[in-house]
Image (spheres, rainbow, N blue to C red):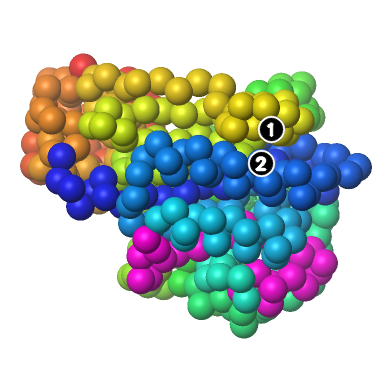
Amino acid sequence: MPVSILNDISLYVHWPFCLAKCPYCDFNSHVRETVDEEAMADALLTELDYFANMVGGRTLNSVFFGGGTPSLMSAGTVSKVIERATAHFNAANDIEITLEANPTSVEAGKFADFAAVGVNRVSLGIQALNDADLRALGREHSVREALGAIELSQKYFKRSNFDLIYARMGQTMREWERELGEALRLANGHLSLYQLTMEQGTPFYGQWRKGELVLPDEDVAAEMYGLTNDICAAAGYNPYEISNYARAGEESRHNLTYWYYRDYIGVGAGAHGRITVNDKTFSTEQNKKPESWLKKVQKDGHSTKVMTHLNQMEMAEEMIMMGLRLTMGIDASEFESRIGAPIQDFTQADQVASLISQGFVLEGFPDRLQLSVSGRTLLNQILGRILA
Ligand SMILES: C[S@@+](CC[C@H](N)C(=O)[O-])C[C@H]1O[C@@H](n2cnc3c(N)ncnc32)[C@H](O)[C@@H]1O
Ligand code: SF4
């Protein structure tokens, strides 16, 4: 394995609290009357120490505060985590430190403080650019607040992103086209554009199953996806991953760590990680419930629910699953140096050939395994066919 790849490391920090639970969301996020932020901060540092000692000195490429709603954290807590992380690791010169933020005015009011403690990229959950749809999505903010937050994010952070959800209830192609045009005018180099998905266990899922909530047909949604890619590409926003669009150089370095299948530590309730220790790669998963997570960190110094050694086949499958999300797909030589065997050993040659003839996989295999736009809309089915 080339030293350069695994000398780098990224850090994901999960903040599991939100002001309200959005009816479509199945992320590990919880609403609590009060949060003992000092205890949570101490526990995050303790868990970070635990993993940092395990992986040893490396170059820290990126930190990502995700949630939940990390913009509810105080800048003091964010600062402590950044300081501890950069004490354990050598921060890359161009380290990317992202914080996810909800666009309420209170949270946007904290941007200057977050910037002052080292956050240099913010990712805002805007979701929709009209008030009726924001209400339908159960959001706590208005379009006015969203626009204000976008403006402030661009004032205080050199780099920024915002998320929109499309293929929403009753949304037409024409409406989405208009909204996307507006988003591109507002954006500063990066957009995350997600199709609304119905996640089991959420209020939306129940309503959708009962027919109370109607989404655009599958073929309309697929057309919306194609249109989204075309419009973004024409505006200079390369569709570099299934749901992510960026001007050259503005790609999320942190998320690329996942898609390139490189090492990252995950701390905080429910966080996931992939770390390589003594040439063995492990997947890690922390306890999900904030209270149980906290208790166990206080008792044991970490709250790892499972830490599993991944064998070569599992790693190959994961790397293919992650890499196929990228428009560039997977470079076979990078695959081989990470996994230790060629990509052909883990893929069904006849299936790949048939997917190429159907236009779902692009020519170029076995040097590169890469999906077409239509292939990316069918990622799960395609994975089911090609994984040996
Ligand atoms: C975990 S959330 C955190 C962001 C922040 N708490 C917020 O909501 O503004 C990250 C993003 O996932 C997207 N998301 C969450 N659930 C989704 C769903 N069911 N369908 C599509 N996108 C979803 C939203 O765009 C959201 O901004
Ligand atoms: S979408 Fe964001 S704000 Fe809403 S519940 Fe999920 S994490 Fe919390």
Identify the disc placed on residue 298: 1
Identify the disc placed on residue 43: 2
Q: Position of residue 9 (x, y in %)?
A: 36, 49
Graded by Cα atoms within 10 Å as few (under 14), some (14 to 19) or many (20 or more), the crowding at tag 1 reads some
The residue stretch that appears in magenta: 90-115
Residue sitting at the far top: 388
Q: Is residue 135 above or below residue 330?
A: below
Q: Is residue 43 above or below residue 295?
A: below
Q: Position of residue 126 (x, y in %)?
A: 67, 60
Q: Nearer the viewer, residue 145 or 382?
A: 145
Graded by Cα atoms within 10 Å as few (under 14), some (14 to 19) or many (20 or more), the crowding at tag 2 reads many
Name the quarter where the C terminus is drawn. Answer: top left
Q: Are marks 1 and 2 in contact (CB under 8 Å)?
A: yes
Residue sitting at the far bottom: 155
Residue 173 seen in the figure: no
Q: Residue at x 35, y 71 (%)?
A: 93
Q: Amino acid at mark 1?
A: Gln
Q: Nearer the viewer, residue 331 or 50?
A: 50
Q: Is residue 82 above or below residue 55?
A: below
Horizontal side of residue 49 vs 337, given as left or right: right
